[in-house]
Image (cartoon, rainbow, N blue to C red):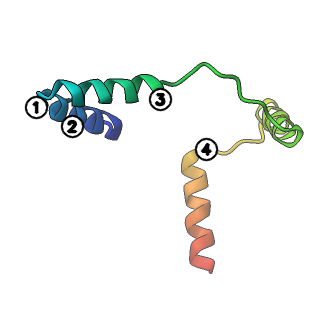
Amino acid sequence: MAQVDVIRNGIIDKLLAISDKDYLMALLRLVDNSAVEDEKIKLTKEQKLMLEMSEADIQNGRTISQNDLDKNDLEWLKGK
Protein backbone atom coordinates (compact mmCIF):
# COMPACT_ATOMS: atom_id res chain seq x y z
CA MET A 1 0.00 0.00 0.00
CA ALA A 2 1.30 3.45 -0.86
CA GLN A 3 2.57 5.64 1.99
CA VAL A 4 -0.17 8.20 1.42
CA ASP A 5 -2.82 5.46 1.75
CA VAL A 6 -1.31 4.30 5.04
CA ILE A 7 -1.40 7.86 6.40
CA ARG A 8 -4.95 8.45 5.16
CA ASN A 9 -6.20 5.18 6.70
CA GLY A 10 -4.50 6.01 9.99
CA ILE A 11 -6.24 9.37 10.09
CA ILE A 12 -9.59 7.77 9.28
CA ASP A 13 -9.15 5.22 12.07
CA LYS A 14 -8.44 8.00 14.57
CA LEU A 15 -11.38 10.09 13.34
CA LEU A 16 -13.74 7.17 13.83
CA ALA A 17 -12.77 7.05 17.51
CA ILE A 18 -13.60 10.73 18.15
CA SER A 19 -17.03 11.40 19.66
CA ASP A 20 -16.64 15.06 20.64
CA LYS A 21 -18.85 17.02 18.24
CA ASP A 22 -17.03 20.34 18.76
CA TYR A 23 -13.67 18.71 18.11
CA LEU A 24 -14.99 17.10 14.91
CA MET A 25 -16.49 20.42 13.76
CA ALA A 26 -13.12 22.14 14.31
CA LEU A 27 -11.41 19.42 12.27
CA LEU A 28 -14.01 19.81 9.52
CA ARG A 29 -13.39 23.57 9.35
CA LEU A 30 -9.63 22.93 9.22
CA VAL A 31 -10.00 20.48 6.34
CA ASP A 32 -12.46 22.71 4.49
CA ASN A 33 -10.15 25.73 4.77
CA SER A 34 -7.10 23.84 3.58
CA ALA A 35 -8.68 22.18 0.55
CA VAL A 36 -6.56 22.19 -2.57
CA GLU A 37 -7.71 24.83 -5.00
CA ASP A 38 -7.43 24.82 -8.78
CA GLU A 39 -5.23 27.86 -8.65
CA LYS A 40 -2.86 28.52 -11.52
CA ILE A 41 0.82 28.73 -10.77
CA LYS A 42 2.78 31.40 -12.59
CA LEU A 43 6.12 30.26 -13.93
CA THR A 44 9.16 32.47 -14.25
CA LYS A 45 10.87 32.99 -17.60
CA GLU A 46 13.63 30.67 -16.43
CA GLN A 47 11.19 27.91 -15.50
CA LYS A 48 9.47 28.19 -18.88
CA LEU A 49 12.84 28.02 -20.63
CA MET A 50 13.79 24.89 -18.67
CA LEU A 51 10.51 23.23 -19.65
CA GLU A 52 11.04 24.14 -23.31
CA MET A 53 14.58 22.73 -23.16
CA SER A 54 13.25 19.53 -21.58
CA GLU A 55 10.66 19.14 -24.33
CA ALA A 56 13.38 19.62 -26.96
CA ASP A 57 15.51 16.96 -25.26
CA ILE A 58 12.61 14.50 -25.35
CA GLN A 59 11.77 15.26 -28.99
CA ASN A 60 15.42 14.85 -30.04
CA GLY A 61 15.94 11.60 -28.15
CA ARG A 62 18.32 13.06 -25.60
CA THR A 63 17.00 10.93 -22.77
CA ILE A 64 18.32 8.12 -20.58
CA SER A 65 16.49 5.25 -18.90
CA GLN A 66 16.17 5.23 -15.12
CA ASN A 67 18.18 2.01 -15.02
CA ASP A 68 21.06 3.56 -16.99
CA LEU A 69 20.92 6.68 -14.84
CA ASP A 70 21.15 4.57 -11.69
CA LYS A 71 24.19 2.74 -13.11
CA ASN A 72 25.86 6.04 -14.02
CA ASP A 73 25.17 7.39 -10.53
CA LEU A 74 26.74 4.32 -8.91
CA GLU A 75 29.82 4.62 -11.12
CA TRP A 76 30.11 8.30 -10.28
CA LEU A 77 29.76 7.61 -6.55
CA LYS A 78 32.45 4.91 -6.68
CA GLY A 79 34.82 7.39 -8.35
CA LYS A 80 34.50 9.88 -5.48
Rendered view: 16 above or below 44: above
Q: Toward the viewer: 62 or 45?
A: 45
Q: Nearer the viewer, mark 2 or mark 1?
A: 1
Kindly identify the amino acid type of the residue bearing the numbered disc 4: Ser
Residue farthest along the bottom direction in this orientation: 80
Kindly identify the amino acid type of the residue bearing the numbered disc 1: Ala
Q: Nearer the viewer, mark 2 or mark 4?
A: 2
Kindly identify the amino acid type of the residue bearing the numbered disc 2: Gly
Q: Determine whether the residue tagged by mark 3 lies in a helix, strand or loop.
A: loop
Q: Which mark is residue 42?
A: none
Estimate the spatial distance between the alpha carbons at disc 4 and disc 3, rounded to whole Å: 38 Å
Work out whether mark 1 precedes mark 3 in sequence or the reverse, and give the earlier one.
1
Work out whether mark 4 precedes mark 1 in sequence or the reverse, and give the earlier one.
1
Per the image, the residue denoted by label 4 is 65
Per the image, the residue denoted by label 1 is 17
Residue farthest along the top direction in this orientation: 38
Q: Residue at x 32, y 37 (%)?
A: 2
Per the image, the residue denoted by label 2 is 10
Q: Residues within 10 Å of mark 3 (few under 14, many from 20)?
A: few
Estimate the spatial distance between the alpha carbons at disc 1 and disc 3, rounded to whole Å: 23 Å
Kindly identify the amino acid type of the residue bearing the numbered disc 3: Ser
Snapshot quadrant of residue 55: top right
Q: Residue at x 86, y 43 (%)?
A: 46
Q: Nearer the viewer, mark 4 or mark 1?
A: 1
